Image: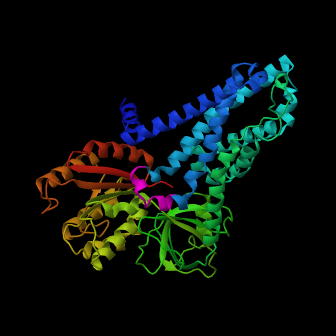
Amino acid sequence: MAEIASFFERELAPKRLLFWIFWLGSHAGLFAYGFIKQRDDPELSNLTAIGLSVTMSRGAGLCLAYDGALILLPVCRNIIRYLRLTFLNRLIPFDENIWFHRQVAYSMLLFTLIHTFSHYINFVRAEELKIKEAWAIHYLAPGGQTGHIMLLIMALMYTSAHRSIRQQSFETFWYTHHLAFIFMMCLYTHAVGCFVRTNIQLGPQRCKGYFSWEYTIWGGVIYFFERVLREVRSRQPTQITKVINHPSKAIEIHFSKPSFKYKAGQYLFLNVPKVSKLQWHPFTITSAPDDPYVSVHIRQVGDFTNELAEVLGCNIPTEKGYIPKELPLLRIDGPFGAPAEDVFNNEIAILVGCGIGVTPFASILKNIWYQHKNSRPSKLRRVEFFWICRDTGSFEWFQSLLKTLEATQLEEGFLKFHIYLTSKLRESTIQNIVINDVSSSYDPLTDLESRTHYGRPNFGDVFLRLKRAIESGRYLPGTDRNLKTNVGVYYCGPSTLAKSLKVEVNKANSEGIKFSFHKEHF
């Protein structure tokens, strides 16, 4: 029941509700238009005589043309990157682009089933009524051939896009998704040929094609220029300068690319031709714009990352930081906008990272340090950083960064660390903690002044205590209590925690304190 209530609460939120009204309404309107247009066109009365299936196929086909024009736009990442900088970002959640891509795909699946099922009925009925050689059109005409090719491609793409398959074999998902090129070519040419003809009783018979492809193709044109831009940009010189092999199978890669300009919190796509010339994988940038290099942290969790570790020599015992003798060529595409880059638009930022999900906040934390060091003005007044780790080895990824930030804060209390360890500890580790915890002012696991907590954080209590501190004036001294306080909650990690965290964020909202939730999407 709680999950159902959470679902309706999320989907009936004002922005999401407006989207559903527009989305469902536009499809219903197009379906009705195609249905009525087919039914009331006297020149097509010979086809309409077949029955309801003809008007259904026409309405569904028009919706498919609409979705075909939209399906590629959410993955035009450069366009989205620049649109995020405009006022439209307040109205349209551009960071939900992959979610919208999936909604378009679901819509295409629904109307494909309606369109295909209706056409099979059409061909059976047309053959019975001896209107024309229906089965020849079904399998020999361009419309029938492209339709069946698209059905086969959809079967491959939709099944391989399922989360379980993506997690087990990302390469399967990656390569089958590139069949989209053939799919779109078939979609644009699906209506060619003369399989729709006017009623001979009304005069000389002529072809009467459907011209929705003239609108559908613009989505493909925009995506084509997007891909050309990304290809040109990715081929600009890039040089690996350093590779660091961290515990828990994490790799840190430093590289230089003079043409690469980015903001803290953004991400990039990385390609290593020696591993695969076609595969591009997204990684968050962990360096700050002020750093003399660009860095990414990569955890070995799949075929691509394991092979990358091999070509970098990371599985060979050696020193922690080194440059391999034979450096593979890197191709970098980006940067692309992400929710975390907006962190400086809030008075208070709560950063929540799980395991390697801490990567976007590494760049944010570094940038905060540079801003304070260089006395740059910022709206941000307090930062609460939560890092939830499964094992103690993960703490070493950013230990030196966290220690530097903790020791060099220019304003007391500006940045607070909350480190959580969720796995069970060995008995020897527990004994070491007990012995060292008493004799040292630093945490024995992280070597930070901030103490490690065990278990998972209760964000409901965290937000409640924060609200009370803000309302009492203790948290942000000197702030007018009548003014609204913006608290941005930024999360990167598994979607299961994201759902519960978003629920707590929505519960915490009040008239004077506005909580907003932002999740990293790739």
Q: Quadrant of residue 151?
A: top right
Above-or-below relation of 244 to 62: below
Above-or-below relation of 387 to 198: below
Q: In this orientation, which residue lies closer to the viewer: 461 or 221? A: 221
Percent x, y of residue 410: 22, 75
Query: Which stretch did the figure color magenta?
Result: 80-91
Note whether residue 350 is visible: yes
**178 horizontally vs 247: left or right:** right
In the image, is residue 82 part of the stretch drawn in magenta? yes
Main secondary structure type of the part rendered in magenta: helix
Quarter occupied by the N terminus: top left
Identified at 59% across, 34% down, the residue is 30
**505 horizontally vs 215: left or right:** left
For the image, the number of numbered tags is 0
Q: In this orientation, which residue lies closer to the viewer: 213 or 79? A: 213
Identified at 64% across, 75% down, the residue is 329
Above-or-below relation of 386 to 325: above
Above-or-below relation of 44 to 139: above
Percent x, y of residue 272: 63, 69
